[in-house]
Image (cartoon, rainbow, N blue to C red):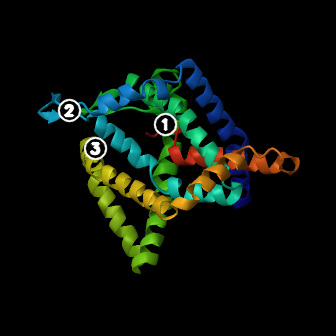
Amino acid sequence: MNDILTKLNDFMYTYVLIIMLVAVGVYFTIRTRGVQIRLLKDGIKSLMEKNTEEENGKKKVSSFQALMISTASRVGTGNIAGIATAIAAGGPGAVFWMWLMAVIGGASAFAESTLAQVYKVKENGEFRGGPSYYMEKGLGKRWLGILYAFSMIVSLGFALAALQSNTISLSVGQALGIPALVTSILVAVLIALVIFGGVRRIAKVAERGVPIMTLVYFALALLVLIVNIQKVPEMFALIFSRAFDFKAVGGAAIGTVIYQGLKRGVFSNGAGQGDA
């Protein structure tokens, strides 16, 4: 059974998912005339707006809070372990293709987030939306929405949660010597306290926690660059030269570089998943 699932995963990830997501990203980039770049200034401006609207005596989720919720699901193990794996398997050139996938994926992310807003519904004073809703209401395919919802419950609720928890437990265990079981229980309790408070509590926690997490992430990356400042020019030279090394034997090496970069780029930024 394990062999069958592995082969199915490899086939879907190699020949279906990557090709479709790149194609869709390019399509939306062309159709929206590069919305991820063209309207970047407007996007930043909207984040600066203060949330003054209220509903039932409670403030609505602001643009900044919405971004933080989205960022919380995108910045994590995929940006660390995923990128390290891509470089180890595809070499420095894979970084360029991850950059490219991030830009292309911006159009896909814009499209899926826009659809989620257009087809969202209000239930018990809170909004519900996402792919399941626009599959049902936009495409008229309720069965597809149910299938997507079930797959997300399994993948995000179990598989991805286990991956994140495992990474945290291993890191804390190696750094502080705390048993993995203790860390896992603590993580589960903290997450429960947040998600059972509804979207507003999730937004408030994300609004405060994600900026700190992101700043620490950038600070550590910047520190690594400063400590190795003399090697930075060589690093960029390697990234661009290896990304287009068409002299590689039979083209196999360049294929691996592109594939690993795009594959890990998708895993890193989450464009196309619809969960944001």
Label 1: how many residues lie within 10 Å, few (<14), some (14-19) or many (20+)? some
Q: For the residues marked 2 and 1, what is the alpha-carbon distance in whole angstroms? A: 27 Å
Answer whether labels 2 and 3 touch (C-beta < 8 Å): no
Q: x%, y% of residue 212?
A: 31, 54
- Residue 17 lies, with reference to residue 89, above or below; the image says above
For the N terminus, the quadrant is: bottom right
Asked if one can make out residue 159 in the rendered structure from this viewpoint, the answer is no
Taking the view exactly as shown, the residue that stands out farthest to the left is 57
Q: x%, y% of residue 269?
A: 51, 44
Q: x%, y% of residue 218?
A: 41, 54
Q: Which mark is residue 222?
A: none
> Label 3, on which residue?
203
Q: Is residue 7 left or right of residue 55?
A: right
Q: For the residues marked 2 and 3, what is the alpha-carbon distance in whole angstroms? A: 15 Å
Q: Is residue 146 left or right of residue 96?
A: left
* Residue at x 51% of width, y 53% of height: 79
Label 2: how many residues lie within 10 Å, few (<14), some (14-19) or many (20+)? few
The mark closer to the camera, 2 or 3, is 2
Asked if one can make out residue 113 in the rendered structure from this viewpoint, the answer is yes
Q: x%, y% of residue 122?
A: 29, 28
Q: Amino acid at mark 3?
A: Ala
Residue 183 location, quadrant: bottom left
Q: Earlier in the sequence, mark 2 or mark 3?
A: 2
> Label 2, on which residue?
50
Dot 1 lies on which element? Answer: loop
106 and 146: which one is in front? Answer: 106
Dot 3 lies on which element? Answer: helix
Residue 165 location, quadrant: bottom left
Taking the view exactly as shown, the residue that stands out farthest to the right is 250
137 and 45: which one is in front? Answer: 45
